[in-house]
Amino acid sequence: MSVVRLELEGRLAVVTIDNPPVNALSQAVRAGIVRAVDEAEDAGADAIVLCCAGRTFVAGADIREFGKPPKPPWLPEVIARIEACRRPVVAAIHGTTLGGGLELALGCHYRIAVPTARVGFPEVNLGLIPGSGGTQRLPRLVGAERALDMMISGKPVGAVEAARVGVIDRLAESGDLLDEAMGFAREQASGGERPRLIRDLSVDPVDPGFFSDYRKRIARRTRGLMSPERIVRCVEAALQVPIDEALRQEREHFFECMASPQSSALRHLFFAERQAVKPPPGVSPAAGGPEITHIAVIGAGTMGAGIAYSCLGVGFRVTVLDYDEAGLARGRKTIEGLYEGGVARGKVSPAKAEDGLGRLTTSQDYGAVANADLVIEAVFESMAVKEQVFARLDRVCRADTILATNTSTLDVDRIAQATGRPEKVIGTHFFSPAHIMRLVEIVRGDATGDAVIISALALAKRLRKVGVVVGNCFGFVGNRMLYGYGRESQLLLLEGAAPEQIDGALQEWGMAMGPHAVGDLAGLDVGYSVRRERTDLPDDPRFYRMADVLVEAGRLGRKTGKGMYRYESGSRAPIPDPEVESWIAREADALGVERRAIDAQEIVERCIYGLIVEGARILEEGIASRSGDIDVVWVNGYGFPRHRGGPMHYADTIGVDKIYARVCEFRDRFGPMYWEVPNLLEDLGRSGGKFADFKPGA
Ligand code: COA
């Protein structure tokens, strides 16, 4: 069946795009639109309605075609054909009209939308700019500033707001979009005059310093990205040069962005994030668990409260249990505080807050969780404590209740063995703060049943988080790799790099924060107690030496005003501390580590390649089912720069052969204890392969 069809309704032509799932503008759709418009004109139609079947008007260009040689007709040609049409063309909009879809709609003479529709330019999230006239037509409708805000945030706006500012000409309120669009088209046709073109409008002038101020305003949040600056240049051009010249410049910037490693990384993540949340190979999507309506959270600490708040926010009934009365009261206060903050910032309505808190109960009695459909344990990170909690849950909970642990490192199989239902036990590792961070590692134990995995994926989706299924091992994917990264950042201290130098180099490279600032923020005691629980630490006195020294001296990080840095009261800014510097020198001396000048390149390579090496092992062992899953974990849980695509995509971009060669150098220079080359890295490095193409177990 054709993806674009033309029907004549009396003297009106209705062109329908039908390209599931989101009516992306594939080559067939582009060609189909041109053909349909030609035929409608040939048939002497008075006006044309352009609409879409299915769940949405066009949601954008077909991202799968990006990075391949473009096939004609290109979108600008399609839009030019619509603009050249002698009779009015009306876009009838529902769903999410994004990117090329909105450009197509702006190429039409008029736009009518249902009030629930959303429109926007999310190209920036793919490292791109609107490349088919969007940067020129939008400012002509809404002015330079609002157009920039829409394109640089990438956030869609609702149709009611879009109608208010002039992007949409009319709202279709009757519930029958096509009928109203046809009425609108007939009205426009009845005048008989040539239809209006957005390209013929001019952009309202701006103040002289507007663009330099705007650049300053966005500098921080667009750090390291290339497309925001290109968007600003295009809007500048919209005010300065004739539209055809500005369109030519826009196209040039678009292709430059498209060819960049940034865009390739962001497009990789677009698909990796959609792939990661699907059931892993071998798990049937049909395996369904019990319907979840009531969730119990064990432990009312920061993590438990954050998880409970997330669950309340999407409609679950939640019982928080803690053995300690004061702890329980604190947990309730934390949840109430989160609601108050949400209301104050306008993110949550007072009615929603009241409704959410109405679904919360707190208890010290295990009987209160007996009927929960799912229990998420978030108690102290100690195997002995968790085993006790799970044994107790197993005794009191319904036989079909799923028991999940929020452990960030511990062995899920051992926790499962504390119960008589290991097939119902799974890890759901949330990240802190749990109500903000999008990632949940879903840890599959040896015995975890398929239905339980599917339920955990569904839970993550309902919480609007990215749930990635991973295997069971120390630290799973994220924290296990963190050891490679953290270990190097600690060794570099002893070898001569200052904390602020290490953090600066990695932040400059793109990490959201440097590892030492992160350590202070999280609390150095957290990693310290995890290391005390580990039985497989390397026999190396240098391993996390400085972190241990600081904790033992009571410098736990920001919360004590001193950690790897010092903090002034009321400020969160890390300040380098000469005392720490002298302690590092003293420890290096005691351990016989020779100190030297270390440059930013070595810092970045040792930390990031440390990550990649562990990632290669994780992939080889099948702990992650795809290299893209590892990327999704690191980008969403650890501040790895999205525009580098995640550690494994970054390795593929640099070339696995080059990474392999450098890791061999590190092994020869620093010894095999930390730089032993994983087989997969060696195989791919020698054969010129990529992590993206490796399928564990294949
Ligand atoms: N090109 C190709 N495929 C696309 C696509 C596009 N522009 N937009 C979505 N898809 C695919 C997804 O990969 C997914 O495929 P899958 O089912 O094989 O995994 C499917 O369509 C559904 O998308 P999904 O995101 O899971 O559905 P949703 O209902 O949550 O969201 C959208 C729908 C349109 C809001 C969302 O897909 C989106 O934001 N798409 C990108 C829009 C965009 O950036 N457009 C500008 C391109 S220049």
Image (cartoon, rainbow, N blue to C red):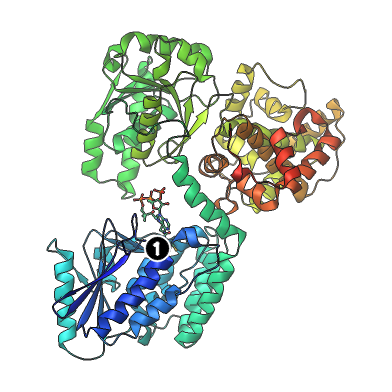
Q: Tell me the quarter of the image containing the N terminus.
A: bottom left
Name the foreground residue: 362 vs 482: 482
The spot of residue 327 in percent (x, y) is 39, 21
Name the foreground residue: 247 vs 6: 6
The spot of residue 353 in percent (x, y) is 25, 39
Sort mark 1 into few (<14), some (14-19) or many (20+) by Cα contacts within 10 Å.
many
Name the image quarter holding residue 608: top right
Dot 1 corresponds to which residue? 60
The spot of residue 495 in percent (x, y) is 81, 37
Q: Residue at x 48, y 80 (%)?
A: 247
Report whether 601 appears left or right of 121: right
Name the image quarter holding residue 544: top right
Name the foreground residue: 19 vs 273: 19
User: Is the CB–ligand 1 distance for label 1 below 8 Å?
Assistant: yes
Compared to 563, does 642 lie above or below?
A: below
Report whether 570 appears left or right of 585: left
Q: Tell me the quarter of the image containing the C terminus.
A: top right
Spot the residue most to the front.
1
Asked if residue 224 can be seen in this view, the reply is no
Amino acid type indicated by mark 1: Gly
Q: Residue at x 76, y 38 (%)?
A: 492
Q: Residue at x 52, y 66 (%)?
A: 228
Quadrant containing ligand 1 reads bottom left
Q: Secondary structure at mark 1?
A: loop
